[in-house]
Image (cartoon, rainbow, N blue to C red):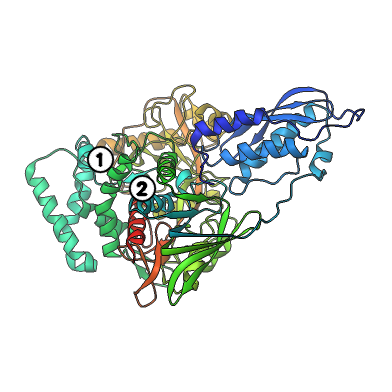
Amino acid sequence: MKRFLRTAAIALTCALAALALVACASQPSGEAAMFKAGTYTGVGAGKNGTVTVKTTFTATAIKSVEVVKHGETPGISDPAIARVPASIVKNQTLAVDVVSGVSLTSKAIIDAVADCVKQAGGSVDKLQTKAGAEKMTAGAAIEKSADVVIVGGGGAGLAAAVSAAQSGAKVVLIEKAPALGGNTIRAGGAYNAVDQARQQKVKMTKPLLGDLKAFLAIDEATVGEFGPTLKTLKGQINAYLASGSDTLFDSVELHMMQAYFGGKRVDLKGNEIHSNLELVRTLATNSPKAMDWLESLGLHFTDNIYTVLGALWPRTHSTNKPVGTGFIGTLSDNATKLGVEIMLETKADELITQKGRVVGVKATKADGTKVTLKASKGVIMATGGFGANPAMRAKYNTYWPSMPLTMPTTNAPTATGDGIVMGEKVGANLVGMGFIQLMPSSHPVSGSLAGGLWGSAESQVFVNSQGKRFVNEYAERDVLAAGALKQEKGLFYIICDQVTAGNPQPGAKNGWGDDIDTLIKNHDVYKADTLAGLEQQLKMPAGSLQAEIAKYNGYIEAGVDPEFGKRNFGPKLTQGPFYATPRSPSVHHTMGGIAIDTQARVLDAKGQAIPGFYAAGEVTGGIHAGNRLGGNAIADIMVFGRIAGASAAAAK
């Protein structure tokens, strides 16, 4: 199956197609009435809000099911929107399987149809126990050969597929989910890259200038092999200061040093970790080139430059598509055009080796069909991390004092560490496995990045349930998460005014495509004309939030935050209405994984490349060390995915 159900347009096509679904089995004449014939509308709770479904009944059957409105992420939710209504109608039961990877959307549709059943006078209990769901049967074993086989259909895997195909390789890509996208499609879409053309339109601020000058005081001998990079950066900074320029400064070396300091960490056992110099150099040098490559494939980046949470510098870019859909849609379109064969719902089980070389993959389709794929040039592992595997997180964690199995995650359910396990079995070295990044600003219940409202990192204000700030909001993500976990129930609020929220208007959507009015209605976001109104809604002590924001606005005027050391500020929060988004930490990125070199070749414990084996994306380790800068992940998967594809295609 080569087609990928893409973006919101395709989601709409799926929904319209569902309207035409009619029960296959005719009802026996004279059968007792089960429903009051007619069309009813029901709702269910999805991942990103309410899912609205219209269901039509005859007296004896569910005639059609249509998803008419939802806020689920385009691309991710498409398989559920297409399959669940069809399965309900075909099998005349609510006891249908949820679609792997989109269980919350699937359940929302089922719940909405159950709501309609009640309105039509039917028995939900009978339909929930009715046997009739289709049973999948394994087909004949499948064997295929290609130059390059890729395991994983997220951003890294698709970048590798397009790159390898552009290099002339015959490519087969397998993905265990029913749709492409992985974590990339549900990520915020932030992409870090040094980009002088866009950044020269940004003015240098006094706080940023202070951060820049701070590098001049760092002793090069204290940063190990990054010393020469720091020396080069110092020369660039001095030249910039001498020039008198008032436009934003940036360089590959600044990106590298911020990744170094942002990722240098010590775990609970006293072990220090920092980024691999050459991997970071490869990332920072090639992220602008990968941007150009993506634009040549048809992806459009906006001219807006901002700082995503935990990025430390204004070099973050976004596309004109919501979240990560633009990356996945563009790459999947190009993969199809280039003849890449894509096999969905195909889970890799083990790597095939021959005389020390990785030569293929054994896999299993969702119906049990066995698949054997032979690779004449190489296998690329791009399965992501293990953020959705609580037992594996607990096994490896050496950074956080505790890693509850119940902690939610921003990750796709498919991010269970499969590629790391398979790689280790063929001798791949694992690095940095004990370090796991928490996303501080996640939905308190679902763990999702979606469902909130805020602006760039410098403009965000974090307060606890008492209306008090507790952290430097411009700091690294692990610092923010650690601060949040110390608050009551790990809960805090991101406070914005009309300006820092991006001036949302009635009917507007946030950056994830969520309807803001619906978020407010569901209390995923709180809105009030005044700060006093927010205090009342959030049950904060009277006057607490008002006093805190007044004090914070004073820090903005002075350019100094004496409490928490925040140095880069957005505008003062003065213009109502005001917004508060409840947030709590969740597992976001597993820092460790398979060791690779700058050619994306997988390395063994001796640092030697394993023939025929490549890896890219979150399945790898060593690039981000103990803490990843916000916005570096998508740059990472595009840079190293592209390199992995070219390296594998060029293998002898």
Mark 1 highlights which residue?
A: 559
Q: Nearer the viewer, residue 525 or 166?
A: 166
Residue at the farthest left position: 242
Side (left or right) of 264 relative to 242: right
Image position, residue 178 (x, y; %):
57, 47
| Kind of residue at disc 2 | Gly
Residue 593 in which image quadrant: bottom left
Residue at figure coordinates x 66%, y 54% from the top left: 367
Q: Compared to 128, does 118 lie above or below?
A: above
Disc 2 crowd rating (10 Å Cα; few below 14, some 14-19, many 20+) is many
Mark 2 highlights which residue?
A: 631
Q: Compared to 488, does 79 lie above or below?
A: above
| Kind of residue at disc 1 | Gly
Q: Nearer the viewer, residue 180 or 222?
A: 180
Side (left or right) of 512 relative to 472: right
Image position, residue 620 (x, y; %):
41, 62
Instruction: Check contact, mark 2 vs mark 1: CB within 8 A.
Output: no
Secondary structure beneath dot 1 equals loop
- The alpha-carbon separation of the residues under discs 2 and 1 comes to 25 Å
Residue 648, numbered label = none
Look at discs 2 and 1 and give the one toward the viewer: 2
Secondary structure beneath dot 2 equals loop
Residue at figure coordinates x 44%, y 22% from the top left: 505
Whether residue 642 can be seen here = yes
Q: Earlier in the sequence, mark 2 or mark 1?
A: 1
Side (left or right) of 539 relative to 335: right
Q: Nearer the viewer, residue 329 or 233?
A: 329
Q: Nearer the viewer, residue 540 or 633?
A: 633
